[in-house]
Image (spheres, rainbow, N blue to C red):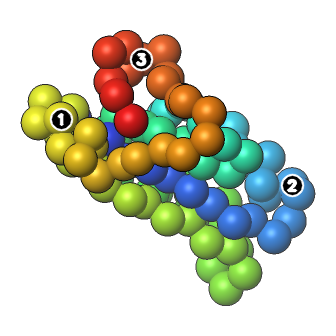
């Protein structure tokens, strides 16, 4: 079962930041500077975490995974809102924030 996951990161070194960006880009839609909206299975999330563990500096960097709910349940509609300009990723046609 896939669920929506916001992956956000604060990486203190530009080289590590680029590595993290490239890794996470393969799993989701880039929505802001260091924020991605992903549709992940449990296996995808575990794989992503493992890849990132090898790249980040554990006492200086931070990666946050925020689960919004399953893709099928539409729970993300209740858990995410947006102010300012609208954002609708290409893979979420018809999804209302």
Name the outermost residue toward the right.
14
Residue 72, percent across and down? 13, 30
Residue that badge 1 annotates: 74
Q: Is residue 5 left or right of residue 33?
A: left
The earlier-in-sequence mark between 1 and 2 is 2
Is any part of residue 14 visible from this angle?
Answer: yes
Mark 1–mark 2 distance (CA, rounded to whole Å): 36 Å
Q: Secondary structure at mark 3?
A: helix
Q: Which quarter of the figure is the N terminus placed in?
A: top left
Numbered label attached to residue 26:
none
Mark 3–mark 2 distance (CA, rounded to whole Å): 29 Å
The earlier-in-sequence mark between 3 and 1 is 1
Label 1: how many residues lie within 10 Å, few (<14), some (14-19) or many (20+)? some
Numbered label attached to residue 15:
2
Q: Is residue 54 left or right of residue 43?
A: right
**Quarter assignment of residue 15:** bottom right
Numbered label attached to residue 91:
3
Q: Secondary structure at mark 2?
A: helix
**Which residue appears at 78% of the width and 58% of the height?**
16
Q: Nearer the viewer, residue 78 or 37?
A: 78
Residue 91, percent across and down? 41, 17
Label 1 close to label 2 by CB (< 8 Å):
no
Q: Is residue 34 left or right of residue 49?
A: right
């Amino acid at each position: 079962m896939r669920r929506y996951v916001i992956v956000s990161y604060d990486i203190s070194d530009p080289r590590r930041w680029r590595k993290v960006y490239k890794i996470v880009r393969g799993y989701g839609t880039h929505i802001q500077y260091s924020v991605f909206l992903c549709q992940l299975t449990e296996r995808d999330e575990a794989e992503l975490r493992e890849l990132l563990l090898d790249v980040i500096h554990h006492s200086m960097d931070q990666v946050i995974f925020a689960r919004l709910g399953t893709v099928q349940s539409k729970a993300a509609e209740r858990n995410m809102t947006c102010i300012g300009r609208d954002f609708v990723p290409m893979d979420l046609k018809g999804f209302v924030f």
